Image: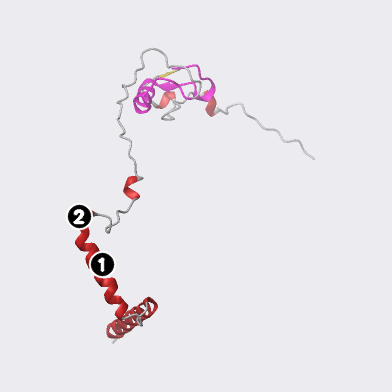
Amino acid sequence: MGDIVLLVDDLQTSCAIPHCRICHEAEFESCKSLEAPCACSGTVKFAHRDCIQRWCNEKGNTTCEICLQNYEPGYSAPSRKCEMIEPMTIRDSLEIPRREHDPENQELGGIAERATAGAEEYSHCSSAADRSASCCRFLALTVSSCSSYYA
């Protein structure tokens, strides 16, 4: 077997060139210089001042999420606005008031009682028969509308 020789004299590694950890631009690609704003090291050590300030404005504080250190002096964050969230109880809205116990709706209760008494006359018409009749009407209307559509 022959030996394999690999020459790496002119090879530049991407980690030798510092990049901004926010916008990912290399230092030579941007006219802005890179800074080390916190105690981070390695590939996340450098960032543009404008990128760090924009990130501080967006998140609302000046603490690095990686190393948990404050950024060097000169960075600021806007004060957070306190939003009042009013608590809301939904339990009351789920209760359905009963009409027959409401003194204002006594006439509605009387109407319901008369309707119930009238239904006793037609006891041979059960709710199952009503449902099947409704189903038959629905099918008849559907078939007739489809046949007129395709005709």
Q: Residue furthest top?
A: 73
Label 2 or label 1, whichever comes before in sequence order: 2
Where does the N terminus fall, quadrant-wise? top right
Q: Amino acid at mark 1?
A: Ala
Locate residue 117 relative to residue 67 in the image: left or right. Answer: left
Q: Residues within 10 Å of mark 1 (few under 14, many from 20)?
A: few
Q: Amino acid at mark 2?
A: Glu
Q: Which residue is mark 1?
A: 112
Q: CA distance from mark 2 to mark 1?
A: 15 Å
Q: Which residue is mark 2?
A: 104
- Magenta stretch: give its range: 37-65
Picture quadrant of residue 33: top left
On whether residue 58 falls in the magenta region, the answer is yes
Q: Position of residue 43 (x, y in %)?
A: 52, 25
Locate residue 109 relative to residue 11 in the image: left or right. Answer: left
Tag 1 secondary structure: helix
Reply above or below: 142 against 18. Answer: below
Q: Position of residue 25 (x, y in %)?
A: 42, 29
In this rendered view, identify the residue nearer to me: 87 or 99.
Answer: 99
Q: Residue at x 30, y 81 (%)?
A: 141
In this rendered view, identify the residue nearer to me: 105 or 147.
Answer: 105
